[in-house]
Image (spheres, rainbow, N blue to C red):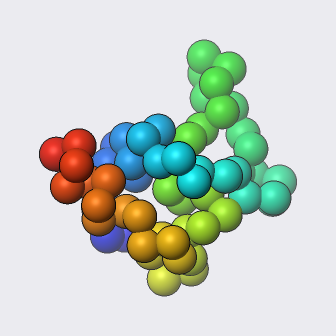
């Protein structure tokens, strides 16, 4: 993993291109009933743990995560 899960969640919440993957476990909900929004559940997140749109680093830099 490139970073911790909390950073992936923060980045995804601030990403205009976030789109949940089409798979059985990615659309799961957390205890509060909200969808788990994270880079790891985004369709643009590759198996190499990178954003295929190259948005991760700019979002981290702009939001100081």
Compared with 13, 22 (above or below) is below
Of residues 22 and 30, the one nearer the viewer is 22
List the single residue furthest toward the bottom: 48
- The residue under the point 26% across, 54% down is 60
Q: Nearer the viewer, residue 52 or 49?
A: 52
Q: Residue at x 22, y 49 (%)?
A: 62
The residue positioned 47% from the left and 39% from the top of the image is 13
Horizontal placement of 64 versus 36: left or right?
left
- On screen, 7 above or below 33? below
Q: Nearer the viewer, residue 13 or 38?
A: 13
**x, y (%) of residue 38?**
51, 48
Residue 46 pos. (x, y %) = 56, 76
- The residue most toward the top is 32
Residue found at x 67% / y 63%: 43
Q: Is residue 35 visible?
A: yes
Question: How many numbered marks, from 0 up?
Answer: 0
Whether residue 31 is situated above or below residue 10 in the rendered picture: above
For residue 63, side relative to residue 21 (left or right): left
Asked if residue 52 lies left or right of residue 50, the reply is right
Can the viewer see residue 5?
no
Tell me where residue 63 appears, x and y as whole percent: 23, 43
Q: Quadrant of the N terminus?
A: bottom left
The image quadrant of residue 36 is top right
Q: Residue 35: horizontal and vertical position, in percent?
A: 66, 33
């Amino acid at each position: 993993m490139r970073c911790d899960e909390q950073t992936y969640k923060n980045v995804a919440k601030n990403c205009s291109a976030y789109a949940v993957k089409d798979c059985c476990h990615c659309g799961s909900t957390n205890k509060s009933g909200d969808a788990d929004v994270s880079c790891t559940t985004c369709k643009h997140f590759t198996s190499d743990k990178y954003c295929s749109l190259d948005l991760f680093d700019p979002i981290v830099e702009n939001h100081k995560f």
